[in-house]
Amino acid sequence: MNYGYFDDKNREYVITNPMTPIKWINYVGTLNFGGFVDHTGGSLICKGDPALNRIVKYIPQLPSSNFKGETLYLRLKKDQGYKIFSPYFVPTLDDYDKFECRVGLQYTKYTTEFYGIKTEIIVFIPIGENRLIRDIRITNLNEETVVIDAIPVVEYTHFDALKQFTNADWCPQTLMSKLVDEGNGNKVLSQYAFKNKGVAENYFTSNMEISSIESDRKIFLGDNEYGTWQQPKSLLNEELSNTEALRGDNIGALMHHLGEIKSGETVRLITQLGQTDNIENELANINKFRDGPVVDQEMEKLATFWDGYLSKYQTKTPDASLNTMINIHNARQCYITKNWSRYLSLYQLGLGARGLGFRDSSQDVMGVLGNTPEEGRELIEMILHVQKRDGSAMHQFNPKTMIANEGDSREHEDRPNYYGDDHLWIIMAVCAYIKETGNYDFLNKEIPFYEKDSAENVIESGTVLEHLLRGIEFTYSNVGQHGLPLLGFADWNDTVNLRTGAESVFIANQFGVAIGELIGLLKELGKDDIAGKFEGYYDTIKNKVNEHCWDGEWFVRYFDSDGSIIGSSQNQEGKIYTNAQSWSVMSGFAEGDRAVQALDSVNKYLNTSNGIKLSYPGYNGYDEDKGGVTTYPPGTKENGGIFLHSNPWVMIAETKIGRGDRAYQYYNQINPATKNEKIDEFESAPYNYPQNILGDEHPQFGLGRNSWLSGTASWTFQAATKFILGIRPDYSGLIVDPCIPKDWREFTVTREFRGATYIIQVKNPDGVCKGVKSMIADGVAIAGNLLPVYGDGQTHAVEVIMG
Ligand code: NOJ
C-alpha cells in the first residue's frame, strides 16, 4: 500500500490516502508560538512552553479517527436538513472524491473534494506571529448552486498541559470563554483561564461574518455529550447557542453562513487562532490578518526564508532519494529538531518539565550550522548557560526560565546525578560553529556558569573557551579503575544506568573526538601550550582504550563498578554495542586492522536490511542493575533496536577508513524516503527520520517509531553532507574529501561558506571510493583538497577529479 509521493519540485510530500498507518505530522511556527498539525487537520499549538502554556487539546493516544485539537465542518443545505462533513476527512469520515495533504516547509496544504465541494486549506504561522492561520478556499464544483455553512472548531486545553489530565476539579472550574463583538459583523471568541485574564487570552476568529458561536463542548456535541464529534447535534440547528462558557470543557466554534455559491465560484475564509495578553489591544493586528493579500505575503515570506535556508547546501547525486532528503526533508528536520529539541511531538508529549536537553540540543545545533549559523550560535550560548563550574552540565533546561535540572538521574539516589557525556557535545558544537563562520571572537564571550548564590546571583562566569576547557578537565579528572572516564548516571545511551564507579568506553572515545577538535582550535589560536597538554591527555585515554577495551573482535562498551565487562563476547546478552566501534574509529583511537575489524564486526553482528542495531543480543528480562535498557523487550529502542541516531556514526567511521560503498549502504538502508514503498511495515512518515526502527529480534522488524525529534536528523545530515559527499568546513577553508560508492561517476554540491558560493562538481572517472586527485577552482589548480575562504559574495566553480 502506498499513501503518497514526494513532490520535490514543490518541496512537499503529498499524502493521497488519509488512512495512513499512524498520524503523520508537520511542524508550524516555532517554540515561541507553534506546534504541529496532523495530516487530517488536527493541531497541537502552544505558546512559549508546551508544558505550561498549551492552547489546544490534542490527545495522541486516541484512535486516528478521533477529533484532535481542531477541525472544520462544512454544511450543505438540503431540502431536508443538512449534509455535514469535514473536508479534513476526520472526524466525519465521509467518502472522499479526492484527498491530498501536502506536507510543506512549515506549512501544510490540504485539497479535498466531498460532495462536489472542493476545499483548499493552507495552515501556517506567519513568521514571528502568535497566530495560526487557516486560509480556506471553498469551491463549488457542482453544476447547480449550493448553500454552504462553514463551522471551524478548536478544542482548548488548560494551559498546564499535565494538570488538564490530572486535575479534573480545578481545571474545568477555571476555564471560560467570552465573545468580543466588533460591531461590524466581525467577532472574536476569546478563551482563557480565570487567572490568566489580561495575561494570556486565546482567541479564535475569522475574516467573515460570524452569525453565532459555541464555546461549551457539552452543548456543541449535544445530548449531554452523547452527541459525537462525528455528528455534533448542535449542527442540526440553523444557529449555534451563543453560549459563553463559564466553566467546563471549552471549545471555539464559529458559524459562518457562506450563502449561495454558484457553480465554479470560490469563497475564501481565513481563520486565526492566537494568544495575546489583551484581546481589545490585539484587534488591530487581528484585522490585518483578515486580509487575503496580507496572508499571501506572509506565505511568501515563509517560502523566502526556506529558499534561503535550503540554498546553503544543495546536491545532485545519482541517488534521487538522497537528493530529496538532503535538499529538502532532512534539512528541514534538522531545523525543526533544533527548534523543538525533544519538547513536543506525537511521542514526546511536552508534559511536565523536560525542556531542552543539553546533550540533545548540542547535537541538533550541528545540523543547522551550515544553513543558519547565527541561530545555531544563539542556541549554543543558551546551552552554555547551564554548564556547571566544574565543567559538567545540567542535563536539561527550560529555555524560557533557564531553570535546569539533572533529568532522570534525580530518580535514583544511589547513582551519580550527572551524565558523563553532556558537556563534551558542546565542545564539538562550538568547534563546528567556528569552522563554519571563522568567528573566533565568540570564544571570548563571557557566559555565566549555572550555579547561583542564595540571592539567585551568578557565582562565576567564564569565556566560551573557558567553558570548553573545563569540560575537558572534568572528564579527564573523573576516571575509574581502568583510567577510563566515569559513566555518571549514563552516557549518550540514557538507558544503561550502572552503579557509581562504572566506566564508559563511549565517553572515552567521545572525549577523543572532542579534544581532537579542540586541539585543532587551540593551535589556530596559537595556544600551543594547552594544545600540547591536551595531546598528552588524548594519548593517555587512547592508550587506556587500546589496553583495556579490545575484546578480540570488537571494543567493549562499559566496565561496571565491580570491574565486570559489558559488551564483550564473555556476556550472554549485550555482547557487542555499535557505539563502542564507531566512536573508537571516529576518535582515531582505533587504528589500522583494529579499526577495520571493529567496523567489520558491526557489519557481521549488528547490521540488518533496515539499519544497524544498537547492540546484540537484546537483554531478555528486567535487570535492576542495568537499568532502563532492560525494561524494553529485545529488538526495541536501546535494547537491540535499530537506534537510528547511532547509524550515521558508523557511516562517518566507514568514510574514515575509506569504505564509501559501505557508508552509502548504511545511509541508504535507513533513508525514510526509500521506505515509501513498504510503508505498512515502516508506518512512520517517509519524509523524516524516526528515532528507532524495531530490530530483527522483534516480530515487527522494520517498524519505525518516534518520528521527527531525534538526533538522527542532525547526524545523518552531517554524515551525508560532510563525510559521504565530503564537503566540510575547516578553520581555514572548505575541505573536499568525498567517500562515495564506487559506481557513482559524478555528483555536484552547491555550498555557501563564509559569504561565497561554491559550486563543486566532483567526477569519479576511475570508480574509486575516496581520494582527490586534482582540484581546479575558477580555472586555477589547487594543491591538496582545501578550498580557500573567498568571502567575496561571488560564485566559484570548482572541478574535482577523484582517483
Ligand atoms: C533519546 C534521548 O533524548 C537522547 O538524549 C539519548 O541520547 C537517546 N535517547 C539514546 O538513549
Image (spheres, rainbow, N blue to C red):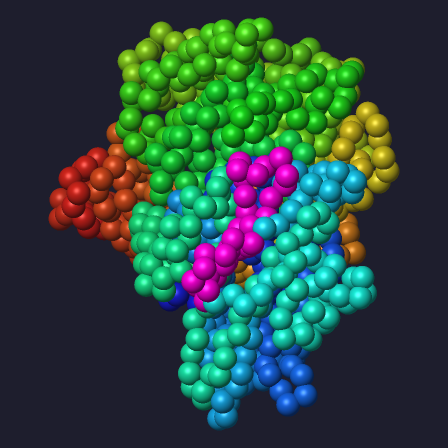
User: Magenta span has 81?
Assistant: no
Give the vertical position of 353 relative to 33 (above or below): above
Most foreground residue, 583 or 416: 416
The residue shown at (73%, 64%) is: 221
Side (left or right) of 111 relative to 167: left
Q: Residue at x 71, y 21 (%)?
A: 410
Front-most of residues 682 and 449: 449
Residue 173 picture location, percent across and down: 73, 42
Q: Which residues are magenta?
A: 179-208
Residue located 38% across and 30% down the image = 377
Residue 352 visible, this orientation: yes
Point out residue 760 in the picture as x, y percentages from the top left corner: 27, 50
Relative to 192, does residue 572 appear above or below in the rendering?
above
Q: Position of residue 378 (x, y in %)?
A: 40, 30
Q: Residue at x 63, y 32 (%)?
A: 354
Q: Nearer the viewer, residue 481 or 100?
A: 100
Q: Quadrant of residue 594?
A: top right
Looking at the image, the residue that sits furthest to the front is 183
